[in-house]
Structure formats: C-alpha cells, structure tokens
Image (cartoon, rainbow, N blue to C red):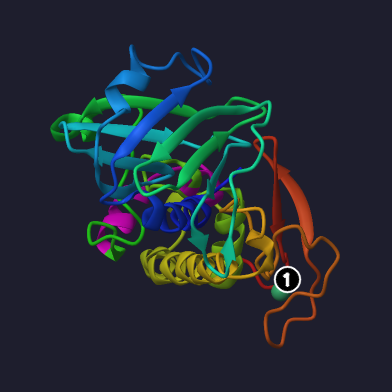
C-alpha cells in the first residue's frame, strides 16, 4: 500500500506529463473503482487543462482549468504509468492496453497517463476546486507532516491524555496525514519509543522529538523515490514503488541498527498489523 512518500513520488513523476497540459481525451473504461466514478467523468475531464498537480495526504489532486479538481487515490495496487514522453532516462512507447487499465488520459503533449488497478481499491472523484478540502475523503485528514501546521506543540496537545498505543495514534489520519505502517515503525525506532506505549503516557519532550523524525524519515523516502524515477526500476514507466533501506520494517531477526545496541528486530502484531521494533532500545 503506498504511503505518503510513494504518492509524492508518483505526483512528481506525473507532473512533467500533466501539469500545464490539456487532457485531450480521458478514457474511462468502467463505471467504478472502489466507489462509482462521478457522473460523466470522461466528459468533464476531456478538454481541461491541468493547472496544478498537488498532493494532500495520500491523494493526488489535479486542479483543472474549468474549476473542478480530480481526486485520485491509488488504493492498494493502483499504478500510474506515463508513456509517450521521456521520463528520467527512458522514453516509454505507448504499451499495449492491459486488462486493468481503467482510466487513460491522452494528453495534448503526446503523453499518455494510464491508471491500472487490478484490485480496484483505488478511487477517483471530481469536486469543485474551491471546496475540495471539504470533500468527504479529505475533510477529516489532519495536518500534512511536512507542512507548517504540524509542529511539536500541535502533536503534544493532540496526543495528550490519549490511551491508545503511540503507533495507533500516529496511524490515525486525523492526527497527522499520510503516515502508514512502514514509516511509523521506522520513526518510532529512531525515536527509541516502544510502539506499544500509551501515547498519553509518553513525556511531552519525547512526543515532541517525533516531529523532526517524522519529517526526516519522510523526506529521505521522498528523495529515494525521486532517485528511483531516474533509474532502471522505472523502466516500465510505473512510478511510486521503490525499495528503501528500512531500518526495522520487514527486517525481523536482523541486528538492531542503533549504534551501541546489541538487540535484534522483533515482529509483533498490533491491531492485526505487523509492528517491527527493537525491544532493547525502544522504551
Ligand atoms: Zn536496538
């Protein structure tokens, strides 16, 4: 499942193909993904110029010249592919259509952007640009972790008195936008905080220490995603899925990477999902 850095990487990969460019024709090949598409979606998209391609949490938002915004979520398995233009070091020809190519944008610059989603947990909707923050998919989402509204004072206040595990609190999209299982595990390891500790029982200073760590972990992943746009892994023109050097995520049994710690990475299950931690240095 893509998290914020993967979605940001997709956005950056799409921008040269889409930003400032007219969608000549939008092809919508089925009535729905996770939810029904909006009425007349193909018509409402065709002929519109993409004024700006931005990201809110794990959503890509394309502001259109006609005053609407296209909201895109990749779901579990959604992929966006650019063909017909130079992307990084590659020029991708238009590939043969595939079975799960549900939405295809033929851009006026010759690029083709294809949304392929085998499992169909992805989503697309249209909303008035001026009201997009109030859209039901977006309105409850908390501040962007890389934005100004997310700071130490905010996080300390938000977690005060909360008796859920700190991992659960950080996964709550109303607390902070876009964090998922992978990066929460990484952040808590770097902070030396046990993911099972109740959020409200952790000192304010330690909660505050999470804010710069969240930024660093996400920014490193975005940089790594950006470099993946240029290298061989992007040879098929698909963006957003890349391997990072995770410190604990999916590294059960590995030596703990914290300097001076001789612990090992454990895997436990919290709320049905894997948590990776070093029980020796995360307290
Ligand atoms: Zn350790």
Which picture quadrant has residue 76?
top right
State the image coordinates of residue 196 (x, y, percent, origin top left). Answer: 61, 51
Point out the residue furthest to the right here.
253
**Residue 113 visible in this rendered orientation of the protein:** yes
* Picture residue at 34% right of the left edge, 45% below the top: 56
Q: Is residue 165 magenta-colored?
A: yes
When asked about the image quadrant of residue 245, the answer is bottom right
**Residue at (70, 59) in percent of width and height:** 249
Mark 1 CB lies closer than 8 A to ligand 1: yes
Q: In this view of the protein, which residue sits in the foreground, 107 or 161?
A: 107
Taking depth in this image into account, of 175 and 120 the one nearest to the observer is: 120
Above or below, 81 relative to 211:
above
Q: Quadrant of ligand 1?
A: bottom right
Could one spot residue 160 in this view of the protein?
no
User: Where residue 124 appears, x then y in whole percent?
Assistant: 42, 27
Disc 1 crowd, CA 10 A, few/some/many (<14, 14-19, 20+): some
Identify residue for label 1.
Answer: 280
Query: Which quadrant: the C terminus?
Result: bottom right
The segment highlighted magenta reads 153-170
Answer above or below: position of 91 versus 17. below
Residue occupying the point 66% across, 53% down = 236
Kindly give the residue lying farthest to the bottom in the view shown: 260
- Say left or right for 5 vs 131: right
Give the left or right position of residue 122, taking residue 142 as reference.
Answer: right
The residue nearer to you, when weighing 21 against 183, is 21
In-image side of 127 versus 209 (left or right):
left
Image coordinates for residue 67, horizontal then vertical, percent: 15, 32
């Amino acid at each position: 499942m893509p998290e914020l850095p993967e979605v940001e990487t997709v956005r950056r990969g799409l921008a040269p193909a889409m930003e400032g460019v007219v969608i000549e024709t939008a092809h919508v090949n089925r009535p729905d993904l996770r939810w029904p598409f909006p009425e007349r979606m193909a018509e409402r998209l065709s002929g519109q110029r993409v004024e700006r391609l931005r990201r809110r949490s794990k959503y890509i938002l394309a502001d259109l010249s006609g005053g609407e915004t296209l909201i895109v979520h990749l779901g579990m398995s959604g992929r966006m592919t650019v063909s017909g233009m130079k992307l990084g070091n590659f020029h991708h020809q238009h590939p043969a259509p595939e079975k799960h190519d549900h939405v295809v944008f033929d851009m006026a610059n010759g690029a083709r952007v294809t949304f392929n989603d085998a499992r169909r947990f992805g989503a697309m909707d249209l909303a008035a640009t001026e009201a997009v923050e109030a859209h039901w998919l977006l309105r409850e989402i908390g501040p962007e972790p890389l934005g100004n509204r997310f700071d130490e004072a905010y996080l300390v206040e938000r977690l005060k008195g909360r008796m859920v595990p700190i991992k659960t609190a950080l996964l709550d999209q109303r607390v902070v936008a876009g964090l998922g299982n992978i990066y929460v595990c990484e952040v808590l390891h770097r902070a030396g905080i046990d993911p099972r500790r109740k959020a409200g029982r952790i000192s304010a200073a330690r909660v505050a220490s999470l804010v710069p760590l969240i930024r660093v972990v996400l920014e490193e992943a975005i940089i790594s995603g950006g470099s993946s746009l240029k290298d061989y892994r992007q040879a098929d023109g698909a963006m957003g899925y890349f391997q990072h050097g995770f410190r604990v995520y999916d590294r059960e049994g590995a030596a703990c990477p914290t300097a001076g710690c001789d612990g090992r990475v454990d895997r436990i299950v919290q709320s049905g999902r894997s948590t990776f931690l070093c029980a020796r240095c995360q307290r």
